[in-house]
Every structure is written in C-alpha cells, then in structure tokens.
Amino acid sequence: MEIYGFCAPGFEALLEAFAKNFRECGDTGAAFAVRQHGELICSLWAGSADRDGQQPFTEETLVNVFSSSKGVLALLAMQQVAAGRLDLDRPVADYWPEFAKNNKESVTARQLLSHRSGLVAFRERVEESLIYDWQAACDAVAATNPWWEPGSAQGYAPFLYGWSLGGLIEKVAQKPLLELYRESLAKPLNLDGGFGALGHRSARIADVSPLKQPLPELRENAIGRAIKEDRKGPVAMAFSNPVSLMMGTNSSEWRGALIPAANGHFSARDLAAVYGDLAGENPTTLEKRWVNEAAHEQSRGRDKVLQAEVSFGCGFIRSSHSADLRFGGKQGFGHPGAGGSVGFADPEQGLGVAYITTRLGQSLFMDRRAVGLVETLYGLI
C-alpha cells in the first residue's frame, strides 16, 4: 500500500505505524493528521474512498466520523456561551419553551452537554424518515420524556444529543445551524467538511463499510449485551429507534440530512485543525477560559448507555488512563466516533490529533488502529 503525505523531521515513525494499519488491521482508506502549536506536523493518507477500490483517498477526502461530530457541535454551543447568548445553568426551556414538555422544564444546557439530561432516546417508536427531517426531529426531542430524573445520572445520548443541543443552539443564535457552522468554524479554520456531506467545499465523500477482517480483540461488548437483555430499554432504544439510525450511512438521504450527533463528514486535516486550535494558548474559535470550562470535568461514572466508565466535560470526553480514551495527558479532551475515527486536543503539548477511516471497527471508543498511532506519536514527543 502506497502511503501519501508527510511527517515533520523526528516524526517519521508515524508513517510506519500508519502503514501497519493497512497491512495488519484491515484499513483500506484512512487519514491521520497532527497539528502542534498551530503547525501541521503530520498529514498521511492512503487507500481508496469507495468500496470498489477505484477512487483514491486524498487529503481532502471527507469521511463520516459519526460521534466525533459531537465535539464540533459542542464547540458551537460553547461559542454561544462565550458570546453571552447561552447560560449553561439556565433551563433549556427558557430559550426553547416547547422543550419544557414531559418533565424537562429543569434540564439545563450544562446537563445536555455533559449527558446528564436523561434524554438519551425516543421512548416511543418513531417513523424511519424522522431522522432526515431536521425540524421534525427537533420537535420530537422537545416532546420526549427523559428516561430518569434529569441530573440524577449520566447517560450518553448517541443521536438525540444532536437534535436537542443543535435545536438549542439555533434558538439562541437565531440562525440555522449550518449557517452558524460555516461562519463560526468552517470559514475561520478553512475546513472542507461539516455536518452532512452536501454543499461543502470538498466533493470527495468516502463510502464506509465494516472491517472485512475484524480486529482479533473484538468481542460482543457491554452495549450489545445490554441491548439483548432489554430490547425496549434505554440502551436498545438509543441505538435503534428508529432502525434507520444505523442504516444507510452511504445514502444520499443520510448525507443530505442534518444529524449533527452522527453525520459529520470531515477530513483528518479538518479535525486536527479544530482541535489544534483549541489546544493553543490563544484559540481563534473560543476564548481560553471557555476552552478550559469545556474541558473541565462535569460528570464521571459508569455511563448508563455506554456501559463504561467515562468522564465528560461540556460536550467533550476527557482523557483517561484507558488506552482507548487516552488523549495525551490529564488535560486532553476530544471525541471518538463509532467505527474508529477520533479527534482530540492535548493542551499540554499543544496538539490537535485526528484519525479517520472508511473501515468501521466495533470498538466502543478508539480501536487498535487509532491507539497505535497515538501511542507512536507520544513516543516521539
């Protein structure tokens, strides 16, 4: 497999680690990018962008990074906080009156951001087409009942996070989410991708598909067991209501929709730019005091949906001792996505790191491919 791109002097070992993912871990299309103190020190890419292996993967190729999208959405929310339009500790219903329905009148923006709202899934079965209708999805979230008392427990919202937080952002910003994204992030950071995949600067959209040869350490995880134990419980409903949440991610409907918790399409260079900016001393997208607030721990515990120990800041997962969530040192923060993609910031080292892949693994957070690259990187610093 021919590897393209570059590594700055002293970081050449990253090329071998990246190549190893293709030789031994099933990668067929992927990219890895690192920024340090504002400079791009590594940008690698290889393989194909389509399932037939005919279209080359390039530095500009956009990949559906699934939940890595949430970090970008959280940044947009924190920008509204910094601008004084959104108070983290005021009820969401103060800005979005309809949101007060069904025992949500006390839910705050901070609780939404840190996955403590109890709003993890639709309780009743919804139409398959709902996820492609932005307004209908936001309205449905506003009418949904939490699964437990808001603030009483931590529960990750795989998909409703995007419509609840995105709907709130639109209310306080008084403009469409996509317009806000283009003005506040895409333009100042020169990003190619964004939420959805249509109408962005890059037309190079990669197809995603499961790993042909799963990594040897993969087993049925705790989420799968929880789903089997209760098909109508919060874990099962969070990932499969509607079923279309997990289907058709290469379709024009999915790519053309606004599903900001899960259908962000970004290049590795995009995510490295976002997190590289946040890792700097003087970020351009968010004042440092608010970056620190976003990265500060808001909730920690065994998550009722993820079925794992996780520490959340305001929209970001915080670095832990576990290899699959180790984002550098204690100050690291970011967000992995289903299948293996990840973006994170390490303010201690001034790093913004991103890995994207078209071959989706089954790990809960980062899998062996991203972990290997991150461990190689930190072995060189």
Image: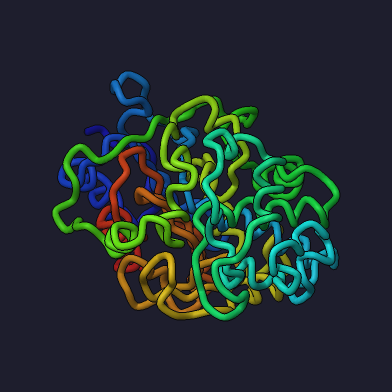
At horizontal 22% and vertical 57% (from top left) the residue drawn is 220
Viewer-nearest residue: 234 or 7: 234
At horizontal 77% and vertical 71% (from top left) the residue drawn is 91
Q: Look at the image and tell me in which quarter the N terminus lies.
A: top left
- Identity of the residue furthest to the top in this view: 54
Find residue 74 and report its image quarter: bottom right
At horizontal 54% and vertical 67% (from top left) the residue drawn is 147
Residue 201: x, y in percent? 62, 30
Q: Is residue 76 above or below residue 267?
A: below
Q: Is residue 279 visible?
A: no
Left or right position of 12 against 245:
left
Q: Is residue 291 visible?
A: yes
Residue 121: x, y in percent? 53, 57
Find residue 39 and report its image quarter: bottom right
Q: How many marks do you count on the picture?
A: 0
Residue 8: x, y in percent? 40, 52
Viewer-nearest residue: 151 or 23: 151
Left or right position of 252 against 210:
right
Question: What colouring does the structure picture have?
Answer: rainbow
Residue 109: x, y in percent? 71, 68
Viewer-nearest residue: 123 or 186: 123
Q: Look at the image and tell me in which quarter the C terminus lies.
A: bottom left
Q: Is residue 329 above or below residue 27?
A: below
